[in-house]
Image (cartoon, rainbow, N blue to C red):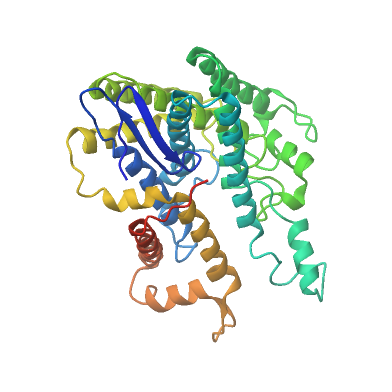
Amino acid sequence: MATTVGSDTTRTSNTAGMTSGVTHAADTSRERLLSLDVFRGMTVAGMLLVNNPGDWEHIFPPLEHAKWHGWTPTDLIFPFFLFIVGVTAHLSLSQRRARGDDDGAIVQQILRRGALIFLFGLFLAWFPGFMWGTIESLPDPSLADRMRYRLEHLRIMGVLQRIGVAYVIGAMLTLYGTWKQHLAVLVAILLGYWALMTLVTVPDRGVPGWQLLDRPDAVLSAWFDRTVLGTNHLWASVKTWDPEGLLSTLPAVGSMMIGQFAGRWIASPRSLAERLNGMFASGALLLVIGLVWHWVFPINKSLWTSSYVVFTAGMALVTLATCMWIIDVHGWKGWTKFFVIYGTNPMIAFMGSGILARITVTLWKIPTADGPESASWVFHRAVFAPILEPHVASLAYALGVVLLWFVILWALWRRKIFLKV
């Protein structure tokens, strides 16, 4: 699937900005910006790579999240998703207005897409619908007990939930007003979140937030999520805070809005060279601002700090501009089909890989001499671990998962089967 951009009209089909083919027809020429699809596909493939190591104890540092403050390449994947959601959401909304759709229909579509993405995320958190393994509070639980326990401890927020919420808020904010007003809203969100997280006294700690930024469970966002959602509905690994919580979703809206600014710029009637120059320049500026802001409000994915929003948006702009320069300017396209196929069905890749991981890592146990082991671990230990160094073996398994989903998505792509919201 290619993407075409010019100046007059637009034709788009998208999955809340996650899957799109976009066409802008100019009067005398057409330019196909395959780079948008490639950027999306690279993000999806990167997600599969970092989410599916063969051995979580042996991962190369660039393929792990930063422990707390700071960043690694892995920490770029989620904000890149939100950025491309913003880009394609702008193109989609512009197309609908251009063909005469009224604002009521557009708002209805925004709400529908956001709700479906959120519900997909809830389904993934709930699957398989019952609690497996030992439950300390229930020594001999029935299936009904396990199902009820699963609902009572369902994680409310998550990756897709954040995308759905950020999409709705970001799209509604930018549906009306001028770009200057949108910029003012973006600045208010980022500065407001900074003020909340650093200047406001955390109620159960009695000190301002800037003194607690090194303590994941003590920051204002953790207190807010515990208060509103309750510990049973937070990230199960810690239960005292959530990396995709409610309050930290506010600046994630900023990541989506910067993508919408990029979509506005990409769809402008300026020459491709001018648009590339603008993207490189603004991306570099945002990188510098983010790094400077890091000194007082550290770059942190789990808190989704304002410096993280600005820094990762700058990285996304530079990365997308580089893809456009390589693919759309120089025409080096032979390597792109692999990522285009990933970019056409991101929801299936995300949902399918999440369900498969839940089955092979958690639910499917295979008897071994050491007791029942997960199917994924048994496969990794039988195929990769005996012949490769542990870190390389873990990476080989992850690459195998990436290739497996490429085959699945390629088969769907050939049959023109796409999951659209």
Q: In the image, what residue occupies the spot 61% across and 27% down? A: 104
Answer with the quarter of the image where residue 197 lies. top right
Depth check: give the residue in front, 377 or 144: 144
Q: In the image, what residue occupies the spot 68% across and 36% down? A: 221
Q: In the image, what residue occupies the spot 26% across and 35% down? A: 32
Answer with the quarter of the image where residue 20 lies. top left
Q: Residue 149 placed where, x, y %?
A: 78, 62
Residue 192, relative to residue 386: is it above or below?
above
Q: In the image, what residue occupies the spot 54% across and 23% down? A: 175
Q: Residue 251 placed where, x, y %?
A: 58, 30
Q: Residue 298 placed where, x, y %?
A: 54, 31
Residue 178, relative to residue 158: is it above or below?
above
Look at the image and tell me whether residue 304 can be seen.
Answer: no
Residue 272, relative to residue 75: is it above or below?
above
With 117 as the anchor, is 331 left or right in this view? Answer: left
With 174 as the anchor, is 95 left or right in this view? Answer: left
Look at the image and tell me whether residue 341 can be seen.
Answer: yes
Depth check: give the residue in front, 83 or 190: 83
